[in-house]
């Protein structure tokens, strides 16, 4: 499991991800009973990628080892074999799902794909949610009337941040929905890019810190990588590097 967050505000888009890779090991005990054990395999996995030529960001969540190969290798092959320098963010999102569906069509794996696309002289932000198993490519930063929306989207182990940010709604005996808890609003439209960066990182750190104390699998962890995309450029402002 993973947690990836994309926060989109008027100045730009901040994408963040954790670095933990969890695996489930199956085996048999000496008395012949089968067992499954979930364990941490690594805290150094890359889940957010920058396509430099297209200035598009990709974050992955869900299954990471496809065919026994880490996602970073698949994304590298995708960028070299499939993409053209002129591909825009919308086309990349569709190509990405098609690329993985050929070999891993039923996989429970998804992506955030973010970037800007020119509409005349105006750079328009696009934030896509993609899922391989459901063959889904859906745009997240639109209102019902198709005007631009600002906010945040998160995928993966999202229960902690969802509990902090979203209302708690239950249905009574008549089926009528009632709001039990209504968090104070976040004014996304007025949020500066720096706050968007901080929110994306906060969402992941809050999850890591919360599950640390809970009796549950520790499937979000490790360093947090943060990629920022604006109409002019795309670059990592926080990114783990190889060391010795």
Image (cartoon, rainbow, N blue to C red):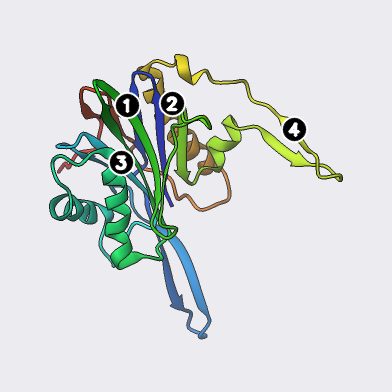
Which residue is most to the right? 173
The residue under label 3 is 90
128 displayed left or right of 167: left
The residue under label 1 is 124
Q: Secondary structure at mark 1?
A: strand
Label 3 packing within 10 angstroms: few (<14), some (14-19), many (20+): many
The residue under label 4 is 180
Q: Secondary structure at mark 3?
A: helix
Q: Residue at x 52, y 43 (%)?
A: 211
Q: Are marks 2 and 1 in contact (CB under 8 Å)?
A: yes
* Separation (CA) of disc 1 from disc 4: 37 Å
Location of residue 33 in the rendering, given as x and y in whole percent from the top left corner: 53, 81
Say which of 73 and 78 sits in front. Answer: 78
Label 4 packing within 10 angstroms: few (<14), some (14-19), many (20+): few
* Separation (CA) of disc 2 from disc 1: 9 Å
Q: Residue at x 60, y 36 (%)?
A: 163
Q: Secondary structure at mark 2?
A: loop
Q: Are marks 4 and 2 in contact (CB under 8 Å)?
A: no
Please tell me in which quadrant of the rendered image residue 180 appears.
top right
Vertical order, 53 against 105 (above or below)? above
Label 1 vs 4, first from the N-terminus:
1
The residue under label 2 is 148
């Amino acid at each position: 499991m993973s947690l990836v967050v994309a926060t989109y505000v008027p100045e730009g888009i901040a994408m963040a991800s954790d670095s933990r890779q969890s695996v489930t090991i199956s085996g048999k005990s000496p008395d012949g009973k089968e067992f499954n054990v979930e364990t941490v395999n690594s805290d150094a996995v890359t889940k957010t990628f920058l396509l430099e030529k297209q200035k598009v960001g990709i974050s992955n969540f869900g299954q990471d080892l496809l065919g026994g190969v880490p996602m970073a290798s698949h994304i590298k092959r995708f960028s070299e074999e499939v993409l053209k320098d002129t591909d825009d963010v919308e086309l990349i999102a569709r190509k990405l799902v098609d690329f993985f569906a050929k070999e891993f069509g039923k996989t429970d794996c998804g992506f955030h794909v973010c970037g800007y696309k020119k509409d005349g002289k105006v750079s328009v932000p696009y934030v896509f949610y993609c899922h391989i198993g459901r063959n889904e490519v859906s745009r997240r930063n639109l209102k019902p009337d198709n005007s631009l929306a600002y906010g945040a989207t998160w995928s993966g182990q999202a229960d902690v941040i969802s509990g902090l940010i979203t209302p708690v709604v239950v249905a009574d005996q008549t089926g009528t929905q009632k709001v039990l808890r209504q968090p104070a609003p976040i004014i996304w439209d007025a949020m500066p890019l720096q706050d968007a960066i901080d929110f994306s990182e906060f969402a992941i750190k809050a999850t890591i810190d919360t599950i640390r104390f809970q009796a549950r699998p520790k499937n979000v962890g490790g360093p947090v990588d943060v990629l920022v995309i604006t109409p002019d450029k795309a670059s990592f402002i926080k990114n783990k590097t190889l060391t010795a």
